[in-house]
């Protein structure tokens, strides 16, 4: 899974430090999920569509970090649980993304990440500012 590290939020850092720990964790989680949703939507647009199963199974979610307080991560992945004929199993996504010996690659996840990274950073920044304003009541 690729990762984004956002640097240069000095303007939000001072206000962010005013938040209580529980509020800051929740705000970080919401912000990273907002960024992951942008990448997820782009990956869904770029995914091959035969039956639509692959597009439906591209999901984003917050990942819990119990051993790293103050760290929030979110990811975009393709669901692959269950049997092959399950509607929640797009196990073949890796064949499309990376190709096989007999089939050329049709990447969609990595190009989606590369194309939407700027927009995802903007979504994270916007959501973080919104969360700070919500908690501090606009007293920034």
Image: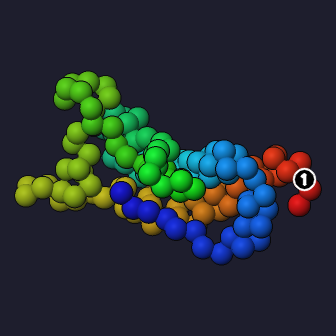
Q: Picture coordinates of residue 107 (x, y %)?
A: 31, 58
Query: For the point 33% across and 46% down, which residue is it?
Result: 48
As drawn, the residue found furthest toward the left would be: 101
Q: Is residue 85 above or below residue 107?
A: above
Quadrant the N terminus occupies:
bottom left
Q: Tell me residue 109's x, y (percent).
A: 37, 55
User: Which residue corresponds to the image point at 59% horizontal and 48% vertical from the top-left?
Assistant: 29
Asked whether 56 or 63 is in front, the reply is: 63
Where residue 132 appears, as percent x and y from the top left, is 78, 53
Q: Position of residue 9 (x, y in %)?
A: 68, 70
Marks counted in the figure total 1
Observer-nearest of 82 and 112: 82
Q: Is 31 positioned to the left or the right of 86 in the image? A: right
Apparent side of residue 10 relative to residue 51 in the rendered image (left or right): right
Badge 1 local density, few (<14 within 10 Å), some, or many (20+)?
A: few
Residue 42, visible in the rendered structure = no
Residue drawn at 27 percent across, 32 percent down: 81
Q: Secondary structure at mark 1?
A: loop
Residue under label 1, please give it: 138
Say left or right for 31 vs 39.
right
- Which image quarter holds the C terminus? bottom right
């Amino acid at each position: 899974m690729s990762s984004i590290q956002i640097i240069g939020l000095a303007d939000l850092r001072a206000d962010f430090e005013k938040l209580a720990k529980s509020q800051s964790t929740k705000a970080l989680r919401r912000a990273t999920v907002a960024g992951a949703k942008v990448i997820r939507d782009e990956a869904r647009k770029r995914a091959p569509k035969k039956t639509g199963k692959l597009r439906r199974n591209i999901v984003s979610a917050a990942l819990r970090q119990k051993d790293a307080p103050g760290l929030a991560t979110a990811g975009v992945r393709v669901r692959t649980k269950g049997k092959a004929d399950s509607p929640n199993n797009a196990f073949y996504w890796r064949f499309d993304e990376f190709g096989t010996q007999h089939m050329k690659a049709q990447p969609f996840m990595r190009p989606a990440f590369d194309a939407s990274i700027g927009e995802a950073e903007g979504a994270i920044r916007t959501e973080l500012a919104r969360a700070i304003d919500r908690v501090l009541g606009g007293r920034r």
